[in-house]
Image (spheres, rainbow, N blue to C red):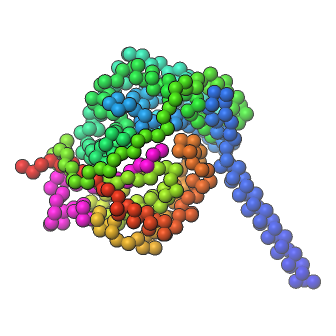
Amino acid sequence: MKNFNLFKKVVFVSAISFGVILFASRESAAQSAPKQEKLLNGLKVLLWSDPKADKVTVRLRIHSGAAFDPQGKEGVMQLLADNIFPNEAAREFFVEDLGGSLEIITGYDYIQINASSKAGEEYLSMLETLSTAVANPTIDKETTAKLKTALLARLKTIEADPAYVADRAVGRRLLGSFPYGRPILGTTTSVQSLDFPDLIDAKQRFLAADNATITVSGNFDRAQGYKAIRRYFGSWLKSDKRVPSSFTQPENPPTALMTVASPNKDVAAIRMAMRGVARNSKDLAASMVFSNILETRLKARVPAAHANDVFVKNEAHTQPGTIVIGFAAGKNEVGSGNGKIEANDLISKALADPITDAEFQAARSAVSTEWAKREIAQFWLDLDTYKLASVDADRSMFDNVSFDEVRSYAEKARTSPLVSVLVNTPAN
């Protein structure tokens, strides 16, 4: 009887424990899944309410970015993004009056506004301010001229950086006129050619409610928040022009080394690049694990003084993106012999060596950890931008990637065309 009573206690405790775990998992799932709505104008709305938060965060994503810049007019989408809040006074309002922050990000695939305010009625002012900025932006000659001047000054600064010159050169070499080979910020020549009618056209085509998703998370009343979004964003117009969804893929690139003069005579940069995969590709996880393995190998094989100057950047977009391998060095450190960096030999060997299980396990753990740090709202926004299968599958993709998949991807990478660019000052 004593043993039977003990057994009942164990079963009871186990049942309670299981119930707590089940409740916790359900609560976690509920917190990660937003309340979803859609306005009549097509704006998708995602709401997460957290009474414990000390602020409210809004992310508003336009699902079109610099990839849609017309050829020869690169920088249009960047200027359009700059025009949303065209002066510092607007940005200061978010900091000083709302106790929050404001940033605008322009990429190839989207424009995203990230804004925050203190928890309380301030978030309603934030929503109203954001709605006015995107639904009724002021696009005129005077504002456009000021934005162009600021962007040209920015270009003058970054075009003096050998690393930026190398990044742009390898993009052109690999992709030609394909959108991802063109600069997001544009060039001095392309930006000078832009005028406010170009921004108006981009606004009418892309800055539209049915081409956007808004997320609200933090300490706010969900019913009140949705009501405010309907009130402030309900009059935002749909686009009346068809937006193309795909681009003609580039031809195979030339693989001979291209040399570009460095804007800094004391700094050199090396870039090598190959095509990558799309953000919604089934091979994305394998490509990211492969990129991490490649970077780890290269860092371990260069002189210790240069380990921090080596990177492998995997950029996945709506269309297949790029994997860029980069080195930075002084002008006399590029060449052969005497311990100087031999980029070609290093990369050839790093690509040729078979992947070990230890490398796979370490790389998968590293990229999975970084992936898990992303805000949940970013996964949901990516769902719409990249037409992903599901948020759950996207968040857990590294749990399912296998050693054989990474090894197979590495085999494909070894046979992919690899372009090379050297940014250096010619020897006297």
Relative height, residue 312 to residue 74 (above, below): below
- Bounds of the magenta segment: 317-346
> Please, is residue 413 above or below residue 278 in the view?
below
**Residue lying furthest top in this view?**
141
In front here: 399 or 318? 318
Q: Position of residue 84 (x, y in %)?
A: 47, 26
- Residue 86 left/right relative to 94: left
> Which residue appears at 33% of the width and 39% of the height?
177
Is residue 205 visible in the rendered image? The answer is: yes
> Of residues 160 and 44, which is closer to you in this image?
44
Q: Across the whole image, how many numbered discs are drawn on residues?
A: 0
- Give percent across and percent down for residue 205: 49, 27
Measuring 68% from the left and 36% from the top, which residue is drawn there? 37
Q: Is residue 337 magenta?
A: yes
In the visual, does 297 lie left or right of 93? left
Q: Residue sitting at 26 percent across and 33 percent down? A: 156
Is residue 158 magenta-colored? no
* Corner quadrant of residue 99: top right
Image location (x, y in percent) of residue 163: 28, 46
Q: Residue at coordinates 35% horizontally, 32% vertically from top-left?
A: 71
Q: Is 313 above or below relative to 152?
A: below
The image shows residue 58 at horizontal and vertical percentages of 58, 36
Furthest toward the right, the residue is 1
Whether residue 369 is visible:
no
Please say if 235 is above or below 70: above
Quarter of the image that includes the N terminus: bottom right
Q: Quadrant of residue 130?
A: top right
In this picture, residue 367 sits left or right of residue 257? right
